[in-house]
Image (tube, helix red, strand yellow):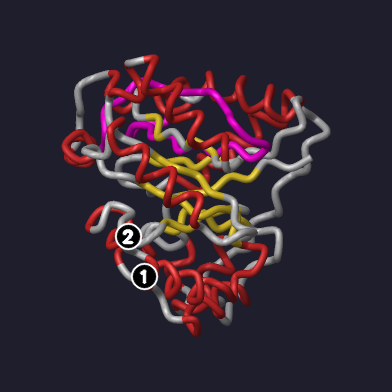
Amino acid sequence: MRLHVGCAMWTHPQWQQRHLPAGHRLRSYATWCNAVEGNTTFYATPSRATVTTWAAQTDPDFRFVVKLPRTITHDRRLNGTDIELRDFLDAIEPLGPRTHVLWIQLPGSFGPTDLGVLAAFLRGLPQGYRVAVEVRHSAFFTEEGPARQLERVLSRVGAEWMPFDTTTLFAAAPVSDGEREAWAKKPRLPRRMRALTEFPIVRYHGRDATEPTVAGWRPWVATVVDWLREGRSPTVFLHTPDNAAAPELARRFHDEVRTLVPELDPLPEPVSAEPMTLF
């Protein structure tokens, strides 16, 4: 039984592995967490050579949740994207089983009237890929009809609905520049905690301070425990405004779940990335 946890990136100026060469930072990160969000692929399709180095630094059971490029999801809104999709899937092929899901993050303007486009796009995806869809249109969260319609579209192809829970972030007024920036950029939507598949994925956004971040994720601890006991295999990503403590928080979340589910496999012991000295 495994719970995968991770962060929005695998390198950060304040993380310990800043001392390592760029080509070794993912290997170091993978001793802290066993999953990562592939946000960089949203902005540009990487080369196969680059992706090959990602695979070389991680075990086959490490999970990449790889975001489709914005040219597919935002610029073309899933229409006429055969060439871009083919190039993207070819680029990430070296990840092999590490590609846990293809992450389709849709813009806030992609609403209930666009579900036919989403359904056609999902039906056209090659076999062999899991898919998770993140929607940001408020109707999917506040109106029962659109929510049911989206669930039907996703369930027909075995796709998951990926929530981005920012309720803790917006629970109180921002108290730092980082929180103010997050308030300006992150979606403000109700929390959604229903899994559609065996592989639910959660993106959780906390605060700068640890105490409200931990208090805010308690409902997710209970939900993840239930999912594990149901035989599901969840992945949880921890975000904060500056992400400086995200790896430690991800491990703490895992520890809280493991306290309630002792049979859960532990995470690996982190490897120190501090530079070696002669004394």
Name the kind of residue labelled 1 in the image.
Glu
Q: Nearer the viewer, residue 247 or 205?
A: 205
Residue found 46% across the figure and 40% down from its top = 238
**Rendered location of residue 126, percent (x, y):** 56, 61
Callout 1 environment at 10 Å: few (<14), some (14 to 19), or many (20+)?
some
Callout 2 environment at 10 Å: few (<14), some (14 to 19), or many (20+)?
many
Which residue does the numbered mark 1 point to in the structure image?
84
**Rendered location of residue 50, percent (x, y):** 47, 80
Which residue does the numbered mark 2 point to in the structure image?
72
Bounds of the magenta segment: 186-210
The quadrant in which the C terminus is found is bottom right
Residue found 73% across the figure and 42% down from its top = 2
Q: Is residue 76 left or right of residue 29?
A: left
Residue found 29% across the figure and 19% down from its top = 171
**Rendered location of residue 101, percent (x, y):** 56, 53
Does residue 45 sit above or below 152 in this rendering?
Answer: below
* Residue at the far right in the pictured view: 263
Residue 188 is covered by the magenta coloring? yes
* Residue at the far bottom in the pictured view: 49
The image quadrant that residue 212 belongs to is: top left
**Rendered location of residue 147, percent (x, y):** 41, 23
Q: Specify whether residue 27 is in view.
A: yes
The image quadrant that residue 158 belongs to is: top right
Magenta segment's dominant SS is: loop
Q: Are marks 2 and 1 in contact (CB under 8 Å)?
A: yes
Say the numbered circle drawn on residue 202.
none
Q: What secondary structure is marked by label 2?
A: helix
